[in-house]
Amino acid sequence: MTRILRSTLLLTAFAFVLPILNAQQAPPRGPVPAPITSAQKIFIANGGMDAFSLQAFEELGLNGTGPYDFLYSAVKSWGQPQLVSTPADADIVIVVRFTAPLVGENGGWEFQRILASTKWQFQTELTIDDAKTQFPLWTLTQPVRPANLKGTWRKNIADANAALAGDLKTLLASTP
């Protein structure tokens, strides 16, 4: 193959590949809402958990307010923003909840079988609302990795709560 033919083939291939590579670039990120990036005072509310999650927490020997307690402690340890005791004093309200939506048919209600199944996707979630308008501004969700042993479940729940707190910290530090 001659040098000119090789160069022509290479340029032709590059001309087809370049648009594909450009098309795969992620679109620019949308802005984080100003009430989140400018929040100085935060109220954290416990959104609770669904009945199945509550049962799972009881079986695992966990406290039903665990996700709330963890998030509150994490935000408090950051020093900023300030935690307030009423939504009226806050710039934003963060509602944290733990749920287990059904993501597939399970075929039985035996607790150990459900815990070991990936048909239920345990997750910890927080929603950030504007304190003045009560309009939801942002939602963050962290799935809990499934496990077979109770100790591993407890660790995976703690890991998801920690990841969610980290996501929140990153979001709050975003520039407008």
Image: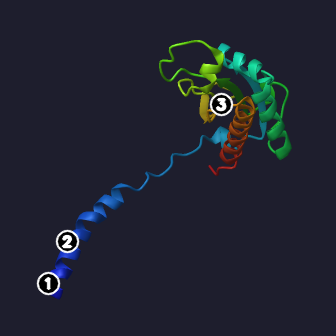
Chain-order first, disc 2 or disc 1? 1
Nearer to me, 63 or 113: 113
Identified at 61% across, 32% down, the residue is: 146
Identified at 84% across, 36% down, the residue is: 73
> Which amino acid lies under the numbered mark 2 shown in the image of this protein?
Thr
Q: Nearer the viewer, mark 3 or mark 2?
A: 3
Mark 3 Cα shell of 10 Å, populated few (<14), some (14-19), many (≥20): few
Nearer to me, 172 or 15: 15
Q: Tell whether 166 sits left or right of 41.
A: left
Rendered location of residue 68, percent (x, y): 77, 28
Tell me the number on the disc at residue 148: 3
Local secondary structure at mark 1: loop
Q: CA distance from mark 1 to mark 3?
A: 60 Å
> Which amino acid lies under the numbered mark 3 shown in the image of this protein?
Asn
Mark 2, residue position = 12
> Which amino acid lies under the numbered mark 1 shown in the image of this protein?
Met
Rendered location of residue 24, percent (x, y): 37, 55
Mark 1, residue position = 1
> How is the model colour-coded?
rainbow
